[in-house]
Amino acid sequence: MRQTVYVFLTPVGSSAAVTPASGVALAPSVQRELEKSLAALRQSKYDEGRKHLAKAQKMAPSNPDILYLMGMVEYTAKDMPAARKQFELVLATGTQPAHANAAGSE
């Protein structure tokens, strides 16, 4: 029996890193942009968060975690057509189990 196992390590004493729900390893530069985006979004700085997500998306255009977060930003901004588009892109990546919330957002 073969099984794929993903292990994510963070240095002791560092803040928790972004753990991709999709199980796809992220390049350090993409992960840094995601962390910056999440920090901005936690402070309700949606434009800044969107900027970092856009930069991350240029580096990893089909990453479902980035697409999902873009959808959540648009959903929070009440731009339902844009949110729906992002969530549909997430579902098109074939990672529905990792992003099940995207299926119910309309």
Image (cartoon, helix red, strand yellow):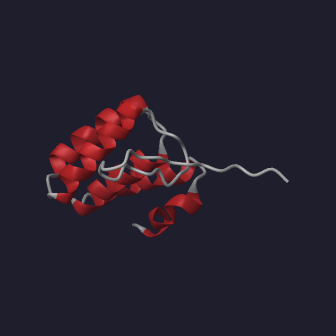
Number of numbered tags placed on the structure image = 0
Kindly identify the residue that appears in the image at 46 percent across and 70 percent down.
104
* 69 left or right, relative to 93: left
Residue positioned most to the right: 1
Residue nearer the viewer, 42 or 7 = 7
Residue positioned most to the front: 12
Whether 27 is drawn above or below 85: the answer is above
Residue 26 place in picture, x, y as percent: 46, 38
Kindly identify the residue that appears in the image at 58 percent across and 53 percent down.
95
Residue nearer the viewer, 25 or 62 = 25
**Image quarter hosting the N terminus:** bottom right
Whether 60 is drawn above or below 43: the answer is above
Residue 41 place in picture, x, y as percent: 21, 55
Kindly identify the residue that appears in the image at 34 percent across and 53 percent down.
16
**Residue 37 in view of the camera:** yes
Whether 81 is drawn above or below 53: the answer is below
Kindly identify the residue that appears in the image at 35 percent across and 36 percent down.
56
**Residue 57 in view of the camera:** no
**Image quarter hosting the C terminus:** bottom left
Residue 37 place in picture, x, y as percent: 25, 46
